[in-house]
Image (cartoon, rainbow, N blue to C red):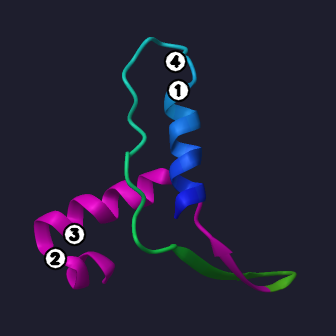
Amino acid sequence: MEQVLKGYEEINASPSLFGTTSIVPREPAPFEFSYKYEDGDGPHNQRCHDWEIEQTYLKWSSLYGEQKALS
């Protein structure tokens, strides 16, 4: 999680192209999210690197609780 926080700090410290405030969450989710799919090369299990997924989890967890957010 420390490495993820460092990455967020680097992104937030970089200048914004549009002069907007940062929308990258300040705290990472306590879970790593992944998805599974299958294509012509066979099955895959890939980690989701989108900060939007973490932000969605954090918001839903605060609104509905951890178990419902995870489901």
Above or below residue 21? Residue 57 is below
Disc 4/disc 3 C-alpha distance (Å): 29 Å
Earlier-in-chain disc, 4 versus 2: 4
Residue 65: percent from the left, percent from the top? 16, 76
Q: In which quarter of the view is residue 58 placed?
A: bottom left
Residues under numbered marks 1 and 3 in contact, where contact means CB atoms less than 8 Å apart? no
Q: Which amino acid does label 4 sit on?
A: Ser
Disc 4/disc 2 C-alpha distance (Å): 33 Å
Residue 66: percent from the left, percent from the top? 23, 79
Disc 1 is placed on an element classified as helix
Disc 4/disc 1 C-alpha distance (Å): 9 Å
Q: What residue type is labelled 1?
A: Ala
Residues under numbered marks 2 and 3 in contact, where contact means CB atoms less than 8 Å apart? yes
Q: Mark 1 points at which residue?
A: 13
Magenta stretch?
A: 43-71
Disc 2 is placed on an element classified as loop
Residue 50: percent from the left, percent from the top? 53, 54
* Residue drawn at 40 percent across, 65 percent down: 29
* Residue drawn at 38 percent across, 46 percent down: 25
Q: Name the residue under label 3.
A: 61
Disc 4 is placed on an element classified as loop
Q: Mark 2 points at which residue?
A: 65
Q: Which mark is residue 16?
A: 4
Left or right: residue 8 compared with residue 39: left
* Residue drawn at 52 percent across, 43 percent down: 8
